[in-house]
């Protein structure tokens, strides 16, 4: 009999998520699976539970939550020798990575995915001693994700991020940082509003920010938005919807295995929507760092 461990963030998606978890557990139990459930209470609970699960004899981990929960599970996998395959049952506000991988959201389809056990080995990103599944970023609006209160996310959904972003622009304005970038493909120093180091093409609910990103190519996609006036910035963000922003003269876009970024002032790093420290940092790809069910 197969053993499935569910690692559940109960604050992600609230009541609807609980109902979906219960429905999945019933499906699994009715079909002969052994099921274990672990509910997170604070930051890093999912990380430590993943490490514990990988040391035991579980066959599959189901990460139930948003991008932050998936990030903690991925970090646990990266720090374990037994790479237990992970199924992502998304219940967060945005769920960029699950959307990018086209993972089923309906419980019947999700259960069928678990039954088939079709596994792919995806790349992860690494920043110093941290890991990311989807994206690491710094600069304009990147800390909005972890500033939004859980209550606001539960009430307003994705709109909560937009309201927080508008509030920051109105109060903080648009101010660049002088940054240095060092990689095989791109080495320079310049005024920058925003950088994104992406593993997938979907970030912040926008599906084409890194249009040629691929979690299987052994590379990270880097997007740098240089200092721009309000009109230029509006043009860049408008073109993100079509993926044409990468052709703007104030945007640099390339792939790399490793890049070092430094700044002349405090620049906070966002890792999969959570606080990830500050620059300087080395961003590297970890090829085939995690197994997921698709």
Image (spheres, rainbow, N blue to C red):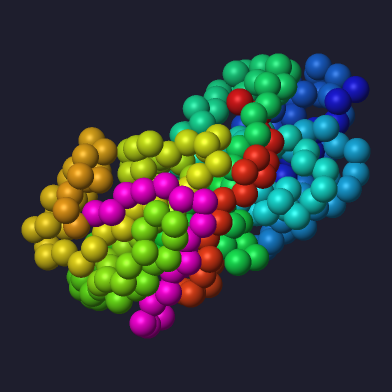
Q: Which residues are magenta?
A: 251-272
Point out the residue furthest to the bottom here.
Answer: 265
Q: Main secondary structure of the magenta part?
A: strand
Q: Residue furthest front?
A: 184
Q: Is residue 227 left or right of residue 90?
A: left
* Quadrant that contains the C terminus: top right
| Residue that extends furthest to the left in the rendered view of this protein | 231
In this rendering, position of residue 126 left or right of residue 148:
right
The correct choice, above or below, for 228 with respect to 256 in the image is below
Tally of numbered discs: 0
Judged left or right of residue 235, residue 93 is right
Foreground pick, 68 / 227: 227
As drawn, 153 above or below 216: below
Residue 94 % position (x, y): 44, 44
Quarter of the image where one finds residue 114: top right
> Which quarter shows the N terminus?
top right
Magenta-span inclusion, residue 184: no
- Residue at x 33% of width, y 44% of height: 209
61, above or below 47, in the image: above
Residue sitting at 77 percent across and 24 percent down? 28
Residue 199: image x %, image y %? 49, 45
Q: Looking at the rendering, which quadrant does residue 19 occupy?
A: top right
Could you say which is closer to the camera, residue 181 or residue 25?
181
Asked whether 256 falls inside the magenta stretch, the response is yes
156 or 243: nearer the eye?
243
Residue 133 appears in the rendering: yes
């Amino acid at each position: 009999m197969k053993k499935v461990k569910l690692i559940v963030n109960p604050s992600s998606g609230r009541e609807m998520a609980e109902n979906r978890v219960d429905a999945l557990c019933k499906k699994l139990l009715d079909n002969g699976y052994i099921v274990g459930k672990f509910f997170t209470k604070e930051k890093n609970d999912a990380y430590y539970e993943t490490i514990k699960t990988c040391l035991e004899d579980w066959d599959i981990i189901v990460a139930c939550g948003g991008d932050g929960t998936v990030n903690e599970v991925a970090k646990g996998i990266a720090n374990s020798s037994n790479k237990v395959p992970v199924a992502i049952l998304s219940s967060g506000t945005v769920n960029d990575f699950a959307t990018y991988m086209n993972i089923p959201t309906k419980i019947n389809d999700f259960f069928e995915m678990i039954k088939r056990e079709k596994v792919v080995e995806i790349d992860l990103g690494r920043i110093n001693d941290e890991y990311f599944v989807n994206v690491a970023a710094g600069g304009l609006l990147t800390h909005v994700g972890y500033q939004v209160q859980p209550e606001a996310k539960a009430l307003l959904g994705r709109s909560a991020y937009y309201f927080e972003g508008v509030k920051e622009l109105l109060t903080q304005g648009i101010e660049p940082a002088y940054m240095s970038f060092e990689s095989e493909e791109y080495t320079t120093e310049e005024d920058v509003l925003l950088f994104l180091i992406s593993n997938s093409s979907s970030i912040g609910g926008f599906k084409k920010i890194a249009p040629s990103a691929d979690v299987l190519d052994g590379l990270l996609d880097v997007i740098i938005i240089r200092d721009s006036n309000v009109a230029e910035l509006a043009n860049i963000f408008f073109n993100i919807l079509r993926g044409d922003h990468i052709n703007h003269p104030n945007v640099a876009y390339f792939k790399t295995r490793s890049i070092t970024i430094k700044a002349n002032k405090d620049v906070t790093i966002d890792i999969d929507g959570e606080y990830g420290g500050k620059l300087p940092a080395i961003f590297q790809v970890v090829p085939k760092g995690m197994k997921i069910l698709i």
